[in-house]
Image (cartoon, rainbow, N blue to C red):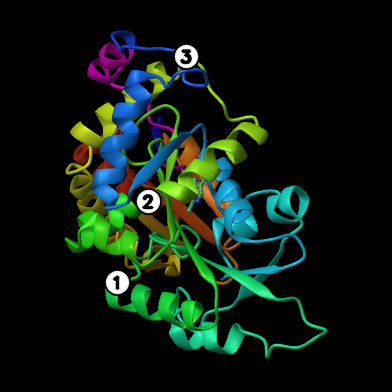
Amino acid sequence: MIDLRSDTVTRPTAAMREAMANADVGDDVLDGDPTVRALEAVTAQLLGKEAALFFPTGTMANQAAIWLHAEPGTEALCDARAHIYDWEGAGAAVLRGVQLRPVTPVGLTIRADDLRRGLREPSRFAPRATLLCLENTHNGAGGAVTRIAELQAVADVGREAGLRVHLDGARLWNAHIATGTPLRDFAATADTVMVSFSKGLGAPVGAALAGDASVMHAAWEVRKRLGGGMRQSGIIAAGALHGVQQHLSRLADDHRNASAFATLVDGHGGARVVAPDTNIVMIDLAPGQHADLVVTRAKSAGVAISAWSGTRLRAVFHLDVSREASLAAGAAIAAALGG
Ligand SMILES: *Cc1c(COP(=O)(O)O)cnc(C)c1O
């Protein structure tokens, strides 16, 4: 089966498993685990931040960021299709008592003008906004990259309105590889940045939150409260470190494979493919086609793909999908779409 459902399905390579097996470890909650510390130092350095903290998941790191920046009873603004809004179980509301205010963009992702429209006039009655959450690349928008100038412009509008800025950069690695913009430049637009190790980098587990040392000091306590204090976590941090060191530049292969697949699929059965910026391909079906049916047909042809909605399919390219498999999948999906 060629599994294009997500870039989370990758399994650790033999070399990654070896790095994990041989990791130097200690009790991270008591003393700090040496491999976790090494990963945190490398991540902070890459992102140009003072400090980074290892988290079990990106979701927990995003929720910790919301906790750090937004007080209960205030509002955090985000893109209407943000992971924080769509896929985190209303965590902001449940865990921190923070209301999310989704901003619907005119284009693929929120820009400065969208945010200006989304901000409320300050009033005694309206919730006070404290935080802006941005996402780059944008998962719900098909892995779209927000270029650095746009990202800076939208963050600036937030700052002028007195908001802190958190960047959900689960796939910031892909934005960096697709544009050549240094990770630290993207990260500089935000107070805190989350990056994931278990997406394109291919590690089995892990994410990090990076920011100023004082904020990350407070983040340690929030992570503990959320149940994310991990003991000999060097075992998993070693996989993440291996991913950062060995699998970052190869993300360009995933982008090329996504693009080749998109070309093979576009137009078949009247479907329209959103030209991919990175490793995610969204396929909009022709009227009358149903996503579940195409998914079933693709599965019997050996390709697993997800139904993003009733009329949209999502295919994601990653470490475990070769060039050859990408081309074979393109042909199979074209056939499943009906010629
Ligand atoms: C996957 C993802 C997350 C959450 O990461 P987990 O490690 O799966 O909790 C957050 N934001 C975006 C944009 C993601 O794609």
The residue type indicated by label 1 comes to Arg
Q: Is residue 89 left or right of residue 15?
A: right
Q: Looking at the rendering, which quadrant does residue 43 occupy?
A: top left
The residue type indicated by label 3 comes to Asp
Q: Secondary structure at mark 3?
A: loop
Residue 259 at x, y percent in the picture: 25, 58
Q: Residue at x 46, y 83 (%)?
A: 157
Q: Which mark is residue 171?
A: 2
Disc 2 residue lies near ligand 1 with CB under 8 A: yes
Q: Which mark is residue 333?
A: none
Residue 262 appears anywhere in the view? yes
Q: What residue is disc 3 on?
A: 27
Neighbour tally class for label 3: few under 14, some 14-19, many 20 plus, Cα within 10 Å? some
Neighbour tally class for label 2: few under 14, some 14-19, many 20 plus, Cα within 10 Å? many
Is the Cβ of the residue at disc 1 closer than 8 Å to that at disc 2? no
Q: Quadrant of the N terminus?
A: top left
Q: Residue at x 37, y 65 (%)?
A: 144
Q: Is residue 320 left or right of residue 142?
A: left
Q: Which mark is residue 147?
A: 1
Check the image and report above or below for 11 versus 258: above
Q: How far apart are labels 1 and 2 at the CA level?
A: 14 Å
